[in-house]
Amino acid sequence: MVEIKDLHKNFDGNVVLDGVSFNVAETENMVVFGRSGTGKSVLLKCMIRLMQPDSGDVIIQGQNIRELKVRELNELRKDIGFLFQGAALYDSMSVKENLEFPLIRNFKLTQIEMDKRVSKVLEAVSLEEAINKMPSELSGGMRKRIGLARSVITNPKLMLYDEPTTGLDPITSKEISSLIIDLEHAFNMTSVVVTHDLLCAKIIADRAIVLSGGKIVAEGDIENLVTSEDPLLKNFFSDEIFEENNGRVQ
Amino acid sequence: MIAGLFKFSFKFLKEVFIPPYEVDQIRKHMIELGMKTLPIVGVTGFIIGLVIAMQLSPVLKRFGAEAFLPGSVGISIVRELGPVICALIFAGRVSSGIGAELGSMRVTEQIDAMEVSGVNPFRYLVVTRVFATTFILPILTVYVIFIALIGAYIAVVLVQNMTWAYFMDRVIFSVEFGDAIPGVSKTFVFGFIVGIVGAYKGYTAENGTEGVGKASTSSVVVSSLLILIFDMVLVKLTLWLWPTVK
Ligand SMILES: Nc1ncnc2c1ncn2[C@@H]1O[C@H](COP(=O)(O)OP(=O)(O)O)[C@@H](O)[C@H]1O
Ligand SMILES: [Mg+2]
């Protein structure tokens, strides 16, 4: 489904990705672990060509996204959902307009079909009552849910999540993580989740990789990574658990 | 920055002709911007008209040329004061607004989200706003000129007896097409400057909320400065194209 091959990216000499490669299989939930500032967001943005990597390839459904024309890229993006870190809801639009926005231009649907999809995704995130609210009236957790609803409304095959639980309290993060995994199953999606939240990773991950210093330093089952005797990983996860116990300060 | 702004304007010229045309968005922005600035430019125009007439009145009297008061006030308002004052106020109000709005959309990744949804954010956000500012400012300017003339008339009436009809007759007699056309048409350029500078600053904002504030304030500074510079150039150009001294 997804193949990342030797991705490199630097900003004015600040090397952020230094040869990142991994594959994600169909319907697999892959978690990318990394500290703040290790280039997780950059990695996701390269995967959907919001950023151009310096070198390396991203192949999604057999298509090398570097080589796609704008129209082909937009066609491929219809199959990809992206949940941004702050949910990125459009401030000037109501929840309903936010949800309709990805549909209006690229999917030729009637208003009835659109309404149906809107209520379906709102039901999936249990926020039917928020349909006419403005984003400013929503709490952090609600915004994440609406962001989630907006990214799955196009029925994507691949979902990319940028720190879906960062900035939320522990209970809400657990709810969001469970919601993500439910949606993954309900919509039969493949996903890449970048996070530094161990709890979230444990709930979602089929497999995990650890990103550090621009490289992938470990890969495997999440339990194995956490209990690993490798000093680097031990250090990494002991800090993560510490962070978790302290109420998850970003 | 100048190079970036230039490239950004060039991109606008390229994208503006490509469908889909976001007509609803353009209409929405024009109404919104017009409504937002109508009161403040009206008040300013009125006061400027009043004050310029009050200032010119004794000067012309000194030279025994009171009869030229409506004409000279009219010409200054139509050629220079109306368009430039209106544009500067518009820049203060609108350029900063666009800079802040697009800046916050940039730093909260709303622009990225749009792009991922297969909507060209440049066309949806930038083209529509720049188009709206370019075409709403001339309309506002005509309105400001009219209000300023009313202000001027009131100042005139306070010192000499004159009907509105006679005043306007003198104004229209003195103000020629060669005054009105360049006066109003340069505001298309000013409107474009206000829109493109605000959009450029906002669209390229970085560094979180701090960047948004910076985008907003520097939009006003840069667009006001560019308006004055282009005014100078355009005045020179129109004097050369339409020599008014016969
Ligand atoms: N647009 C950009 N311009 C310059 N540097 C950037 C840009 N985006 C990210 N970076 C740098 O790349 C590094 C990784 O950023 P990011 O991917 O956002 O980290 P995170 O893993 O927390 O998501 C940071 O050091 C950041 O300063
Ligand atoms: Mg990030």
Image (tube, coloured by chain):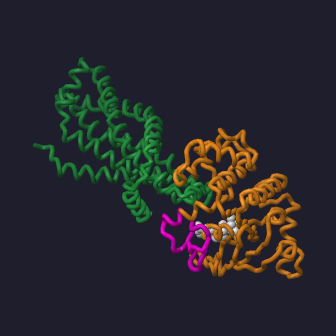
Chain colours: A orange, B green
Residue B157 spot, x, y in % from top left? 28, 20
Question: Residue B240: within the magenta?
Answer: no
Q: Picture coordinates of residue B135 (x, y %)?
A: 36, 43
Which residue is at the front of the view, A50 or B50? A50
**On the rendered image, what quadrant is the C terminus of chain A found in?**
bottom right
- The residue at 18%/33% (across/down) is B174
Whether residue B211 appears in this view of the structure is no
Residue occupying the point 41% across, 61% down: B11
* Rendering coords of residue A79 (x, y %): 61, 62
Residue B165, image quadrant:
top left
The image quarter in which residue A237 lies: bottom right
Nearest the eye: B240 or B107: B107
Quadrant where the N terminus of chain A lies? bottom right
> Per the image, is A60 magenta?
yes
Residue A73, relative to residue B237: is it above or below? below
Image-quarter location of ligand 2 = bottom right
Residue A128 in view in this figure: yes
In-front residue for pair B1/A169? A169
Part of the protein shown in magenta: A47-74
Residue A135 at what x, y percent from top left? Answer: 66, 44
